[in-house]
Image (tube, rainbow, N blue to C red):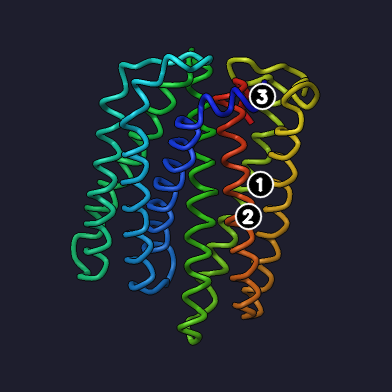
């Protein structure tokens, strides 16, 4: 039964994962541009990668309205067009921001444009699939933190790889990215505990009841593989980056990309398949 419910909702799971990656990557580029000394080549490359992710998320989003009748959770189709518009806005903004970074002109304008598009995607996503008011707020928080973690780990991993080809770069940008990632994963872990304790989600069971039963395996995997392990690895990446062990830091971040991707997929599968917010 759990596997069948996940298969029935693969398109929605795919959208949530890629949308989080696209919006989070763009936000990480903006933070990197204005809050770190990361190189313009790195920032432009990562902005263009956010554009690619936004395109994929937009393609995934196109087919969702026709499949919404499969959902066992509440959904509101009135936000579909605006959500799709947000994906197109983010695609354009990410391309223009990458060009602006290289040309050193118009960066703040396109950064604001892209952040607005990212916010539109996350807000309309929560409005589309959150159900009642409380569900909309909790799903929005879940999407924001998922974006920060998944986009953050991708951006940090790419930056770590940049050091392997440009070894004279100062370590401060990578240390800062790793710290941001560690904080975001810690917040995600705290939300996991809060959501399970409150029974958040359309079919949530209060008092950590979701940690037993038919979905328990997926919940435990989300906790251990998608949250606890990445938190430890992110902390280790900070320590290795501080000592300029950039190959080790990059390797750790590569590992984190895989585990955080798996954790994000599990979280999306549990929401759309089981109605559980984790």
Classify residue 93 as left or right of residue 65: left
Q: In which quarter of the image is the C terminus?
A: top right
Mark 3 secondary-structure assignment: helix
- In the displayed structure, 78 sits above or below 140; it is above
Which residue is at the far right?
A: 212
**Residue 161 image offset from top left, x and y in percent:** 50, 73
Name the residue carrying label 2. Answer: 182
Who's the residue at 41% across and 28% down the image? 125
Who's the residue at 27% across and 66% down the image? 101
Quarter of the rendering containing residue 244: bottom right
Marks 3/1: CA–CA distance: 28 Å
Who's the residue at 57% across and 26% down the image? 271
**Residue 169 image offset from top left, x and y in percent:** 47, 82
Observer-nearest of 250 and 118: 250
- In the displayed structure, 268 sits above or below 79; it is below
Observer-nearest of 16 and 185: 16
Who's the residue at 53% across and 71% down the image? 160
Q: In which quarter of the image is the N terminus?
A: top right
Which mark, residue 156?
A: none
Whether tag 2 and tag 1 are in contact, CB under 8 A, the answer is: yes
**Residue 90 image offset from top left, x and y in percent:** 29, 45
Which mark, residue 186?
A: 1
Classify residue 254 as left or right of residue 213: left
Which mark, residue 2?
A: 3
Marks 2/3: CA–CA distance: 31 Å
């Amino acid at each position: 039964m759990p596997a069948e419910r996940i298969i029935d909702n693969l398109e929605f799971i795919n959208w949530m994962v890629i949308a989080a990656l696209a919006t989070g990557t763009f936000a990480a580029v903006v933070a990197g541009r204005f809050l770190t000394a990361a190189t313009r080549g790195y920032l432009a490359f990562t902005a263009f990668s956010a554009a690619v992710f936004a395109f994929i998320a937009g393609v995934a989003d196109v087919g969702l309205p026709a499949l919404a009748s499969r959902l066992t959770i509440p959904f509101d189709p009135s936000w579909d067009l605006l959500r799709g518009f947000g994906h197109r806005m983010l695609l354009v903004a990410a391309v223009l921001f990458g060009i602006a970074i290289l040309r050193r002109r118009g960066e703040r304008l396109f950064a604001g444009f892209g952040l607005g598009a990212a916010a539109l995607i996350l807000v309309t996503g929560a409005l589309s699939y959150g159900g009642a008011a409380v569900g909309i707020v909790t799903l929005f928080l879940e999407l924001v933190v998922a974006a920060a973690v998944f986009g953050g780990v991708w951006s940090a991993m790419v930056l770590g790889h940049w050091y392997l080809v440009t070894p004279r770069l100062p370590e401060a940008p990578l240390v800062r990215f790793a710290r941001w990632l560690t904080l975001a994963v810690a917040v995600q872990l705290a939300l996991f505990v809060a959501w399970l304790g409150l029974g958040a989600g359309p079919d949530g069971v209060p008092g950590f009841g979701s940690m037993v039963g038919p979905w328990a395996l997926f919940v435990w995997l989300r906790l251990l593989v998608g949250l606890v392990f990445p938190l430890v690895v992110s902390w280790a990446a900070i320590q290795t980056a501080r000592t300029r062990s950039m190959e080790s830091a990059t390797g750790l971040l590569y590992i984190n990309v895989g585990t955080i991707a798996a954790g994000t997929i599990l979280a999306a599968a549990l929401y759309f398949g089981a109605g559980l917010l984790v």
